[in-house]
Every structure is written in C-alpha cells, then in structure tokens.
Image (spheres, rainbow, N blue to C red):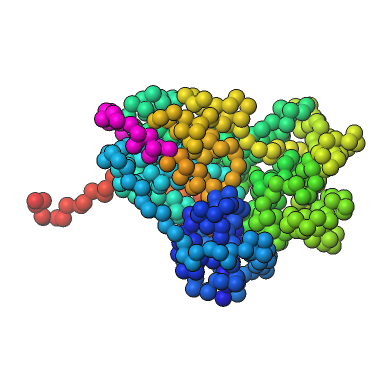
Amino acid sequence: MPHVVTQSCCADASCVVACPVNCIHPAPGEPGFGTAEMLFVDPATCVGCSACVTACPVGAIKPDTTLTDAELPFLELNAQYYHRNPHEDRTPLALVPTQRRLRRPGPFRIAVIGAGPAGLYTADELLRHPEITTVDVYDRLRTPYGLVRHGVAPDHGSTKRVTELFAAIESQPGFRYRLGVDVGTDVTLAQLRSEYHGVVYAVGASHDRTLGIPGEHLAGSLGATDLVGWYNGHPDRRELTVPLHHERAVVIGNGNVALDVARMLTRDPQWLAEHTDIAPHALNQLRHSNIREVRILGRRGPANAAFTVPELLGLKQATHVDVVVDADPSTLTGTDRHTLILRELAERPTPTGTRPRIVLEFHAAPVEIIGDRRTVALEIARTGADGVPTGTTRVVDTGLVVRAIGFRGSGTTGLPTDPATGIARHDRGRVEPGLYVAGWVKRGPRGFIGTNKTCAQETVESILDDLDGTDTTDTPATPPTRGVGLDAWRRLDAAEIARGATEGRPRVKLTDPHEQARAQAPREAPRRKRAWGVVPA
C-alpha cells in the first residue's frame, strides 16, 4: 500500500530516517531538501509499513487508500516527481551523520532572539551538542512559535501541528524561554553578548513591501502582514480596522499568502468558529462581512504564479467558494504543474453565483488606489508577457485592497543589514564571531517552515567552528532571570484550549498582553481546610 505526502514539508526528516527502504525524497544531503515544496514517496519502492506515518510530526503522510477526493492529486505529484527524478542509485537506508563533538568541553551558553520556527530549530540544533548546556530563547511577545501562531492561516490546522514538534524541542533539558523581553529595549545586545558565548538573531521580515502607487496610504489599503496578524490574534494587530462593508476585496500578488487572505475573507464564519483558532475579534467582524468576491492580481501569466502546488491544489478542491480563472486561454497551454491546474479550473462550468468566489486574474497590475480618506476603487493596468503595463486600464470598485507582494526586514540594532531588504550581511550565518543570524533575517523572506531547519544547521556549524577556534577561557557573566518561561507559556496555552472547549472551538486565543500575563501568572495552591478538632502538626 503506497503512502503519499499531502502537504508542504516541515523538513524534520523524521519520516526519511524512519523509512526502512529509503523511498522518501529529497532526503537530507540531496538537492532540494529543505527548499522543495514538499517530499515525495516513491510508489515503486514503498512497502506500506507505515513507519513514516507515525514519524511525521504534522500528520501529512497517508496510505493511498485513505486519501480524500481533495488529496488524490498528490498521487500524481508523487508519480511525476519520480518520473523526472529517478532514484535507483540511492543507498537503501537513510544515513545519519556522526555527532560532532567540540574540542573545548564547555559548558557553553547561547542566546537566541526570536521564538519562531527559525529560533526553535536553531535551539534544537545547538542542544544536540553536549558541550552546549543552555540555550535561552528570547521573544518580544509573551507567546512563542512566531509565524506558526501568527502567520499560518487558521484554516490550515494540519500545518499548525508543527507546534507538536516545537513542544518537543522546548521540553529538552537546557532549553529556556525568556518571553516578553524586547531585545533593544528591555535588554541590550551588548548585555547579551557579555552574558552568553554567542547570540543568534532569528527574527523575521516584519514589514510588507510597498506598491509605490498613489492612494496606498488610504484607509482600506492594508499590508498582508497586518491583515494576517489581525485574524491570527497578533497583539499588535488586534485593534486593526478592516473594512468589510463592500462586496469586493482585491489582493495584489499571487503567492500563498494571497491565497490565505482570499480564503479567510470568503470562509463561512460559523465554520471558522467550529474548526479554527481564528482570533475572536476577527471572527466577530467577519460575521458581519459583505465580501462576496476576492480578486487576486498577478502581474505576469499563470506559469509565473508564485502559489505552491499544494496550496493551489487545496484551492482547486475547496467547496466553500467558486474559483474563477481570469486569463487569456493562450496563456494556459503550458505543461508546467501550475498551468495544468489553472487550466482545469478555467475549464469548469461558469459558477452559479450562489457562493462567494475567488478570481485569479493574471496580467494585471495596480495603478492607483482611488478614494478620499478611504478606499473606494482600484485602477488596474493590463500587462504584457513581461509584466509591463500595455497602456490599457480599467477601474473596479472595492473597499479593501491588500498588498501581498512580499516582505522586508525592518533593520535590527547591532546588525549590519542591507537598507533595501533588511537582510543581515553574514557568512554562513556568522555576522562576526559571537554574533549570528538564522531565518528570514539571514536569507530573506523565502522558503517554507521546514527551510528554517537547514538554515539553522548551517548557522550552528559556524557557531561550533567559532567555539572550537577560540582559545579564551573567559566565562560570561550569569544572565539574570528575564521575562516569563516555559511554565508560564504552558499555563497560557492551557487557558486558551480550556476557553476553546467551553465555546466548542479548538482554541480561543488571548490577544491582550495584560490578559495573557494574568493567564501566565502562577496559581496559588488552595489552602487546606483544618479538620474540626484536629490540631495541625
């Protein structure tokens, strides 16, 4: 019974190591591992033992006989991969590299700034080495997991299951959270460098790229980071004003984030309440939304779309919304996977109009957001094959324009960064001995959750090289206790799950930092009542 991977990979590689016949690729050390959209199971060599099923931390692998109709296209993806990438010459078992040991005995202490996937993967790689006994993970927020908590769409519950892997990482001896600590305000980088043998910045790209068109400042013109943070309960975005009064919204950019936004704006609020952890304030506003159409604009043609194949397949199988492809038929004749899926969507019967719809429009670029103090329309230019406007424009009414054209870093105090991109200047993660980077601040906003694992491995190798190459015996000062730790996070996590249970939801997020702090506070043990007539010992 062949097995099938049904979503983007977290790159944990547990499934690869568990497989006794080496039928899952690309594997660690092979081209594409950590950067491929997903892994693939070779149907010709899979023996159906299900070892990979139990090893996968996000539940993405299934026997082919249990696939839903929506998941059947992944069978074809597996077959296509092995047709294009034959693996007959591979060794029969996954190879586990020999554990590196440091020349110096330690103990060493490392600080990681950022509790998202990049930070947690970095902590995990560091703690694999016995000489590194302590890794303190700092974050400005009182909650960990970064974009997994505040960026992954609420209706992607299977992707969020990677938090189970993170829970295993944070449970290791030597791992400590320092949550609610803003590095640069509550503590300086200089202080951290005096207290640790190394400091790793593992922060993301927190700002949206701008369009550079008139009207971008109007109310109703939002960056995807703001909107995604709003419906995911990011404390900084909980009071965001999102206009939902108009029947049409427009998303500029055609990557996975654009699809996330479109799905969330067209989902039935009651379904969201029952199946997701969407933030309460966003859920309440979406219950009164008038949006019936979301147009996703791509400057170039279907073959250049930035959607990943798993996300596009998910949209194709969606039952809550009609999907319309607005593209010249001549641009849908290619044989690449994106174009094939889009051509199938374009050939569907015309929707009846009873459901909300998502329109995938190609060769369209924004010219101007029109309005006085708020957005009322968007002027759109027709573009040629090169994405350059041809001179033909039209105007569509809309109350909400969301730009999803990529992210950029904001610059980090103490790091030499490119002013245009916010990416740090480094060599294999090393800014200078003792100061390192991982994640988007290192490589830019690209890749998937699992890409952070291979990124972290490279940075940790640089850290180990520097620890081995330093002859000094100086011991850093002992850092004071800062912020809140793992126990506090677990109390908040339990409080959110308990609140969700009372409302029939998977989780109800606490988004107010003051409310989070109350949930994280240790509870006093109940006082024992004195039995009548008994003298206490």
Q: Nearer the viewer, residue 82 or 524?
A: 82
The answer to whether residue 123 of the structure is visible from this angle is: yes
Residue 49 appears at what percent x and percent y? 49, 73
Q: Nearer the viewer, residue 115 or 268?
A: 115
Residue 238 in the figure: left or right of residue 312: left
The answer to whether residue 154 of the structure is visible from this angle is: no
User: Relative to 480, is 272 above or below?
Assistant: below
How many numbered marks are there? 0
Q: Which residue is depicted at the point 26% across and 49% down?
A: 526
Please give the range of residues in magenta: 462-481
Magenta span includes 312: no
**Which image quarter holds the N terminus?**
bottom right
Residue 158 in the figure: left or right of residue 402: left
Residue 424 in the figure: left or right of residue 86: left
Q: Which residue is depicted at the point 44% across and 25% down?
A: 184
Residue 63 appears at what percent x and percent y? 56, 71
Q: Nearer the viewer, residue 414 or 95?
A: 95
Residue 191 appears at what percent x and percent y? 36, 25
Q: Nearer the viewer, residue 187 or 242?
A: 187
User: Relative to 423, is 311 above or below?
Assistant: below
User: Relative to 34, is 22 above or below?
Assistant: below
Residue 294 appears at what percent x and percent y? 75, 47
Q: Residue furthest right?
A: 392
Q: Quadrant of residue 113?
A: top left
Q: Quadrant of residue 270?
A: bottom right
Residue 1 in the figure: left or right of residue 130: right
Q: Quadrant of residue 199?
A: top left
